């Protein structure tokens, strides 16, 4: 396993279009996270899954955003009716949650979205 | 309200200089992680500190967790251009399904040759 994989790496779309990003986590990891990041800023939490269950969604995640992890493996993040403010890097991370204190995240390389 | 304050936000130094980045909060964390991110890439974990007062070294990087587990610092000795990047700290709070990582806004470091 080579790590967390995200695709596409880059997506340019017109305002109003729908886009979908895919994340393949490290295979033995049970937790999967989605973050959004704008240039020079830290990651903003969007949502996370433990296995196939979506345990938390941020208030940042409007009704236009939906995430799934149907079999507890890969995940998709869909943005409907994109707006220019959605332009950002979308990061996926996974972790193997067993330790209450650590739970390091392993990030993918991100999917950069540009909405024209 | 930013729960985890990082400072400085930007830092531009010459190769060979030393620097320290700070991560401060009024909240107690069960652990704290430092990540480094290069442009166009995802963050990569550098270290996790767990015990109050803990010091960890990673080559020229020294990480310290405050005694009260509310703050942390990253010190880089003899910085090199390859150290350029965004340094992020993230503190862990809560337990079980309520466990969360609180992220700082990052310190953007540029080391000039």
Image (cartoon, helix red, strand yellow):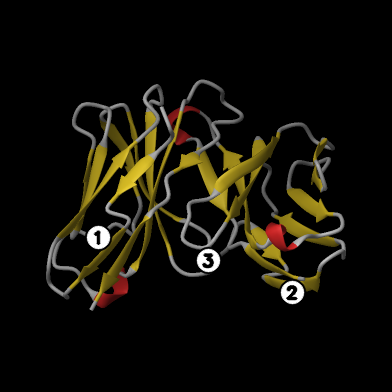
Q: In the rendering, which numbered label is found on residue A62?
A: 1
The N terminus of chain A sits in image quarter? top left
- Quadrant in which residue B50 is drawn: top right
x then y, percent, for residue B52: 80, 36
Q: Secondary structure at mark 2?
A: strand
The disc, 1 or 3, on the residue closer to the chain's N-terminal end is: 3
x then y, percent, for residue B51: 77, 31
> In the rendered view, would you say A35 is above or below B55?
below
- Quadrant in which residue B45 is drawn: top right
Residue at image location 82% in from the left, 53% down from the top: B75
Of tags 1 and 3, which is closer to the observer? 3
Q: Secondary structure at mark 3?
A: loop
Is disc 3 on the same chain as disc 2?
no
> In the rendered view, would you say A22 is above or below A44?
above
Q: Secondary structure at mark 1?
A: loop
Is disc 1 on the same chain as disc 2?
no
Q: Residues within 10 Å of mark 1 (few under 14, many from 20)?
A: few
x then y, percent, for residue B72: 76, 49
Of tags 2 and 3, which is closer to the observer? 2
- Name the residue tied to disc 3: A41
Gap in angstroms between the C-alphas marked 1 and 3 = 20 Å
Contact between labelled residues 1 and 2, with CB atoms less than 8 Å apart: no
Q: Residues within 10 Å of mark 2 (few under 14, many from 20)?
A: few
Is B47 on the left-hand or right-hand side of B54?
A: left
Residue at image location 69% in from the left, 58% down from the top: B82
Contact between labelled residues 3 and 1, with CB atoms less than 8 Å apart: no
The C terminus of chain A sits in image quarter? bottom left
- Name the residue tied to disc 2: B12
Q: Residues within 10 Å of mark 3 (few under 14, many from 20)?
A: some
């Amino acid at each position: 396993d080579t790590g967390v994989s995200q695709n596409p790496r880059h997506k340019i779309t017109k305002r109003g279009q729908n886009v979908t990003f895919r994340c393949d986590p490290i295979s033995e990891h049970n937790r999967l996270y989605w973050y959004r990041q704008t240039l020079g800023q830290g990651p903003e939490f969007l949502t996370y899954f433990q296995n196939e269950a979506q345990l938390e969604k941020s208030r940042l995640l409007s009704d236009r955003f939906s995430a799934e992890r149907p079999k507890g493996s890969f995940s998709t993040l869909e943005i409907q009716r994109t707006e220019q403010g959605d332009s950002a890097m979308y990061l996926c991370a996974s972790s193997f949650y067993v330790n209450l204190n650590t739970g390091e995240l392993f990030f993918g390389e991100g999917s950069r979205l540009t909405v024209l | 309200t930013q729960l985890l304050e990082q400072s400085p936000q930007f830092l531009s130094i010459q190769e060979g200089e030393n620097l320290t980045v700070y991560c401060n909060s009024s909240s107690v964390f069960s652990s704290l992680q430092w990540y480094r991110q290069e442009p166009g890439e995802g963050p990569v974990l550098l270290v996790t500190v767990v015990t109050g007062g803990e010091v960890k070294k990673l080559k020229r990087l020294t990480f310290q967790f405050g005694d009260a587990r509310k703050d942390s610092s990253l010190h880089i000795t003899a910085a090199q251009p390859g150290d350029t990047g965004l340094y992020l700290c993230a503190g862990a709070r809560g337990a079980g399904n309520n466990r969360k990582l609180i992220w700082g806004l990052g310190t953007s470091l540029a080391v000039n040759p």
